[in-house]
Image (cartoon, rainbow, N blue to C red):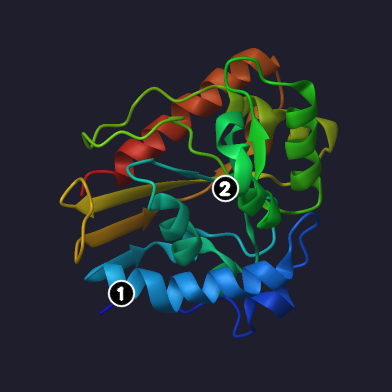
Amino acid sequence: MVTVESIKPLSNSSPSTQTKSSGVAHWLTSIVYPLGRYGVLPFYFKKITVTGQENLPKDSPLILAPTHRSRWDAFIVPFAAGPYVTGRDCRFMVTADEMKGLQGWFIRQIGGFAVNQKHPAIASLRYGVDLLRQGEMLVIFPEAGIFRDNQIHPLKAGLGRLAIQAESHYPNLGVKIVPISIHYSPNIPHWRSEVNVTIGKPLEVKEYATGSAKKESIRLMSDLNQGLIDIDSF
């Protein structure tokens, strides 16, 4: 059985009538999202518990910043914060290596986009900023890798730079960053495992877009790191 210990979804409409994201094949998401939510996840996992959905802004440009513990995270994040909860698609930022072949086609169709972690392209940054300007909800794993030791690993600075650049270029845009903790029991999930998701309070990026972009980005990521630590004590 799947349980969600949180507030009710923010909208009673179906995702296909709520989301209007550019670059998303809604014919595909209208299949993928319900299949994952009502089919794959409840079939595979014994229990999924989500707390803190009241911390998800309803309409602000948003970056979800989850811990990364398994490839299942790509299904768990939309379950906890996707269109059935917020009315918005999850626009995943992924590595360039993940955008190859059939997998890459699929990721692009559901709104994902690539970034080269070693040599980030300006075009990727601009695309992310443009999505935020349109009020989209980005998903960026700030640890940039999968870690199964239940520790918060050093966060990559790119998320902070992207958020501050968007808020600086478009004053009063209202970008927010929401820390999300994901825990599997056991740590390496398998058939009938349990999942606990905790959604923390959002950080207001405008509070960090007032000085040196480099220094403020460091401060923002430090606060995000603390936010993840605070909710990751399950």
Which mark lies nearer to you, 1 or 2? 2
Query: Which numbered marker is on residue 103?
Result: 2
> Residue 155 at what x, y percent from top left?
45, 25
Is 130 left, or right, of 9 in this rendering?
right
- 18 left or right, relative to 11: right
Residue 43: give its label.
1
Tell me residue 186's x, y (percent): 15, 51
Quarter assignment of residue 119: top right
Under tag 1, what secondary structure? helix
Instruction: Examine the rendering and report whether any part of residue 200 can be seen.
Output: no
> Residue shown at 63%/65% (left/top)?
58
Q: Where is residue 153 in the image (x, y as percent from the top left)?
A: 34, 26
Which residue sits at x=43%, y=79%? 38
Q: What residue type is labelled 1?
A: Phe
Looking at the image, which residue is at 68% across and 30% down? 162
Relative to 40, residue 130 above or below:
above
Q: In this view, does 222 lie to the left or right of 172?
A: left
